[in-house]
Amino acid sequence: MRIIFFASIFVSTILYSQQKNIIDNNNLNKENGIKCIKMAH
């Protein structure tokens, strides 16, 4: 169970950092935030 737990944290960290890099590179932080808020409601 521990291996799966750490693997999921590892994968989610990589995915999060990739998304963050894409947002930073494109300067779409505010646009994505607005889209997320609109989709959530």
Image (tube, rainbow, N blue to C red):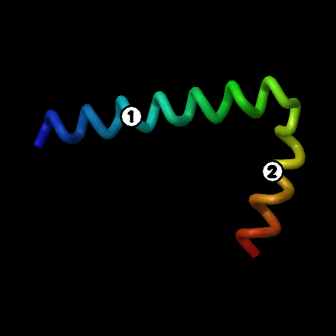
Closer to the camera, 22 or 38?
Answer: 22
Q: Position of residue 20 (x, y in %)?
A: 67, 30
Q: Is residue 24 left or right of residue 31?
A: left
Closer to the camera, 14 or 30?
Answer: 14
For label 1, the crowd category at 10 Å Cα-Cα, with few meaning under 14, some 14 to 19 and many 20 or more, is few
Query: Considering only vertical position in the picture, is 25 above or below 30?
Result: above
Check disc 2 and give the amino acid type. Gly
| Residue on which the image places disc 2 | 33
Foreground label between 1 and 2: 1
At 86% from the left and 38% from the top, the residue drawn is 28
Residue at the bottom extreme, as displayed: 41
Check disc 1 and give the amino acid type. Val
- Residue 11 shows which numbered tag? 1
Query: Considering only vertical position in the picture, is 6 above or below 31?
Result: above
Q: Is residue 34 left or right of residue 18?
A: right
Secondary structure of residue under mark 2: helix
Secondary structure of residue under mark 1: helix
Of the residues under marks 1 and 2, which one precedes in the sequence? 1
Specify the quadrant of the image occupied by residue 29: top right
Q: How many marks?
A: 2
- For the C terminus, give its image quadrant: bottom right
At 25% from the left and 32% from the top, the residue drawn is 6
At 78% from the left and 26% from the top, the residue drawn is 24
CA separation in Å, label 1 and label 2:
23 Å
- Residue 39 shows which numbered tag? none
Q: Is residue 3 left or right of residue 40?
A: left
Q: Is residue 18 left or right of residue 11?
A: right
- For the N terminus, give its image quadrant: top left
Q: Position of residue 21 (x, y in %)?
A: 69, 25
Q: Position of residue 36 (x, y in %)?
A: 75, 59
